[in-house]
């Protein structure tokens, strides 16, 4: 059985291909599609997080597990993440999409 606390700290690391950390402003959106009985209507719940990368190009944030229903083993427990980084100095914006 997997148990989560009311909030989990998650991190994203940004590095150049050659390994050096990237400094900049990060914006992360986490979304989850949930089903509600009895009609099985679906609803999308999203939360946004933003801030600056810290040491080693890392951005961390506390994510509420009560808002995003993280019941193990259920299809609804998939989290869809989109992260973007606005690189300091160059203004280059990079985006990444993934399923957690």
Image (cartoon, rainbow, N blue to C red):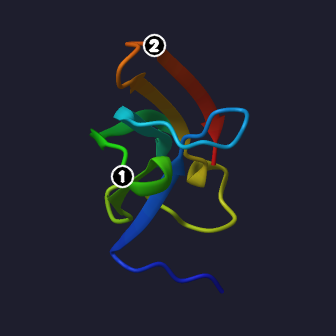
Q: Residue at x 59, y 27 (%)?
A: 96
| Residue density around tag 1, few if under 14, some if 14–19, many if 20 or more, within 10 Å | some
The circle on residue 17 is: none
Tell me whether circle 2 and circle 1 mark residues in contact (CB < 8 Å).
no
| Residue 90 image offset from top left, x and y in percent | 41, 14
| Residue density around tag 2, few if under 14, some if 14–19, many if 20 or more, within 10 Å | few
In the foreground, 77 or 95: 95
Q: Secondary structure at mark 1?
A: loop
Q: Residue at x 58, y 54 (%)?
A: 77
Q: Which residue is label 2 attached to?
A: 92
In the foreground, 35 or 69: 69
Can you say whether 86 is above or below 9 in the image? above
Q: Which residue is label 1 attached to?
A: 54
In the foreground, 21 or 76: 21
- Image quadrant in which the N terminus is located: bottom right
Can you say whether 3 is above or below 39 in the image? below
Q: Residue at x 60, y 42 (%)?
A: 20
| Side (left or right) of 25 relative to 21 | left
| Residue 75 image offset from top left, x and y in percent | 67, 50
Can you say whether 48 is above or below 92 in the image? below
Count the numbered circles shown: 2
Among the 4 quarters of the image, the one containing residue 67 = bottom left
Q: Secondary structure at mark 2?
A: loop
| Residue 88 image offset from top left, x and y in percent | 35, 25
Q: Earlier in the sequence, mark 2 or mark 1?
A: 1
Can you say whether 52 is above or below 77 in the image? above
| Residue 33 image offset from top left, x and y in percent | 50, 38
Q: Residue at x 72, y 32 (%)?
A: 17
Disc 2 versus disc 1: distance between alpha carbons?
18 Å
């Amino acid at each position: 059985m997997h148990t989560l606390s009311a909030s989990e700290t998650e991190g994203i690391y940004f590095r150049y291909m050659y390994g050096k950390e990237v400094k900049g402003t990060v914006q992360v959106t986490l979304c989850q599609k949930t089903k509600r009985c009895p009609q099985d209507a679906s609803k999308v719940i999203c939360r946004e997080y933003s801030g600056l990368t810290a040491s080693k190009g890392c951005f961390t944030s506390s994510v509420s597990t009560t808002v995003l229903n993280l019941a193990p083993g259920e299809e609804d427990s998939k989290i869809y993440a989109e992260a973007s980084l606005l690189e300091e100095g160059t203004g280059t914006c990079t985006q990444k999409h993934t399923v957690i």
